[in-house]
Image (spheres, rainbow, N blue to C red):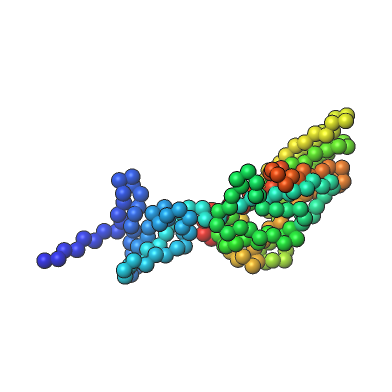
Amino acid sequence: MASTIQVDKIQDTGGNTIVESDGSGAATTRIPATYLGSGTASSTTVLYGDQTYKAEPGGAITAASQWRLTTSFTGEADTMDSNLEEVDTDGGGVIGTSMTESSGIFTFPSTGYWLITFTLNAYNGASFDYSTGIILTTTNNADYDAAAESATNIVYVGDQTPKNSATTSFLFDVTSTTNCKVHFKVANSTGGAIGTTGNTAKNTTYFTFVRLGDT
């Protein structure tokens, strides 16, 4: 005579849930994304026989990339809209699909929770000043607000050209790749006295984008 074993959850010896019923009565179970292989999105479903398996939220990172300023400039920039490139030297890599950029506006390749980090490297050749790096986001593809900022003081001494850096970050809930976008701003205390460092061979002023999970 055939027998049936009914359980809500099956775990491995480390306590990790391998299969878990969704409790709906349908033939649907949930599998941790790590069991579906590296790079599997947490929204991925796999059909095996008459069973549907779904990766749990919090799986492997599916998208990450870095962009940088290639050429230094002085003064402020309401939108850093030129001399930008995706990092392509010294083994720099990309996970998944890259961000796209047009006139300084960055578009995300997929929805999800994205960690955005802006590192500003500034220099001063005139007086005591400060420089601020600002992340601006929009959720309607029109109105941008300052979501995060960080400032650094730079003290000019004689004929020296001192440098300093500032880093800020923002966790952006990208619910639409059409409406949710980001750009970056540099604001200085004296307008034109401070420079922002760019370099095409290494990261000096740069942006990092990492998709952490589903929205």
**Quadrant where the image shows the N terminus:** bottom left
- Using the rendered view, name the quadrant where residue 7 is placed: bottom left
The residue positioned 74% from the left and 58% from the top of the image is 104
Residue at the top extreme? 158
Residue 106 appears in the picture as rendered: yes
The residue positioned 57% from the left and 62% from the top of the image is 111
Number of numbered tags placed on the structure image: 0
Closer to the camera, 126 or 159? 159
Q: In x, y percent, where is residue 192? A: 87, 46
Q: In x, y percent, where is residue 130? A: 80, 40
On screen, residue 103 above or below 149 = below
Q: In x, y percent, where is residue 57? A: 46, 57
Q: In x, y percent, where is residue 153? A: 78, 37
Residue 151 appears in the picture as rendered: no
Residue at the left extreme? 1
The residue positioned 70% from the left and 49% from the top of the image is 68
The residue positioned 37% from the left and 60% from the top of the image is 30
Q: Is residue 179 left or right of residue 13?
A: right
